Amino acid sequence: MLLNPWSTYPGAPIAGATIPTVGTPQPMVPEAWVRTFKNIPSTERWEPVALRQYKEG
Protein backbone atom coordinates (compact mmCIF):
# COMPACT_ATOMS: atom_id res chain seq x y z
CA MET A 1 0.00 0.00 0.00
CA LEU A 2 1.35 3.42 -0.93
CA LEU A 3 0.36 6.44 1.12
CA ASN A 4 0.29 10.01 -0.09
CA PRO A 5 3.46 11.80 1.00
CA TRP A 6 1.43 14.47 2.86
CA SER A 7 -2.23 14.99 3.72
CA THR A 8 -2.88 17.79 1.20
CA TYR A 9 -1.31 15.86 -1.73
CA PRO A 10 -1.46 16.45 -4.72
CA GLY A 11 -1.75 20.05 -3.54
CA ALA A 12 1.28 21.68 -1.98
CA PRO A 13 1.92 20.89 1.68
CA ILE A 14 0.71 23.63 3.99
CA ALA A 15 1.44 24.44 7.62
CA GLY A 16 -0.51 21.97 9.73
CA ALA A 17 -0.56 19.23 7.07
CA THR A 18 0.41 15.77 8.26
CA ILE A 19 2.35 12.83 6.89
CA PRO A 20 -0.05 9.85 6.61
CA THR A 21 1.09 6.76 8.51
CA VAL A 22 -0.42 3.39 9.30
CA GLY A 23 -1.05 2.70 12.97
CA THR A 24 1.06 5.51 14.41
CA PRO A 25 0.47 9.19 15.15
CA GLN A 26 0.73 11.30 12.01
CA PRO A 27 3.65 13.75 12.24
CA MET A 28 3.40 17.29 10.87
CA VAL A 29 5.16 18.01 7.59
CA PRO A 30 8.51 19.73 8.10
CA GLU A 31 8.56 23.51 7.57
CA ALA A 32 11.11 22.95 4.78
CA TRP A 33 8.49 20.97 2.83
CA VAL A 34 6.04 23.88 3.06
CA ARG A 35 8.67 26.22 1.60
CA THR A 36 9.98 23.75 -1.01
CA PHE A 37 7.19 21.63 -2.49
CA LYS A 38 4.49 23.06 -4.77
CA ASN A 39 1.32 21.52 -6.24
CA ILE A 40 2.19 18.26 -8.00
CA PRO A 41 1.25 18.35 -11.70
CA SER A 42 -0.71 15.38 -13.05
CA THR A 43 2.27 14.37 -15.21
CA GLU A 44 4.34 13.70 -12.08
CA ARG A 45 1.83 11.77 -9.95
CA TRP A 46 1.77 8.06 -9.25
CA GLU A 47 -0.97 6.30 -11.16
CA PRO A 48 -2.06 2.85 -9.98
CA VAL A 49 -2.32 0.26 -12.72
CA ALA A 50 -3.99 -3.11 -12.14
CA LEU A 51 -2.03 -6.03 -13.60
CA ARG A 52 -3.50 -9.45 -14.12
CA GLN A 53 -1.85 -12.74 -14.92
CA TYR A 54 -3.67 -15.21 -17.09
CA LYS A 55 -2.89 -18.91 -17.25
CA GLU A 56 -3.39 -20.66 -20.52
CA GLY A 57 -5.20 -23.95 -20.60
Image: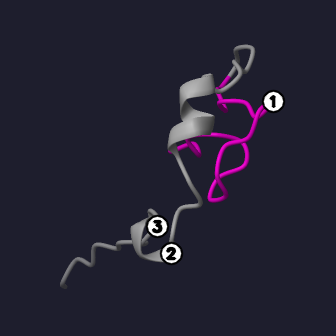
Examine the rendered structure and indicate whether residue 25 appears above or below residue 57: above
Disc 3: which residue: 48
> Residue 34, image x and y in percent?
63, 37
Whether pointer 1 and pointer 2 mark residues with C-beta atoms closer than 8 Å, the reply is no
Helix, strand or loop for disc 3: loop
Quarter-of-image position of residue 27 = top right
Mark found first going from the N terminus, 3 or 2: 2
Dot label at residue 16:
1
> Residue 50, image x and y in percent?
43, 72
Q: Residues in magenta?
A: 1-22
Which residue is pictured at 46% across the width and 69% down the height? 47
Frontmost residue, 33 versus 9:
33
Disc 2 marks which amino acid?
Ser
> Residue 16, image x and y in percent?
81, 30
Disc 1 marks which amino acid?
Gly
Dot label at residue 27:
none
Q: Residue furthest front?
A: 35
Which residue is pictured at 46% across the width and 67% down the height? 48
Mark 1 or 2: in front is 1
Mark 3 or 2: in front is 2
Q: CA distance from mark 1 to mark 3?
A: 27 Å
Disc 2: which residue: 42
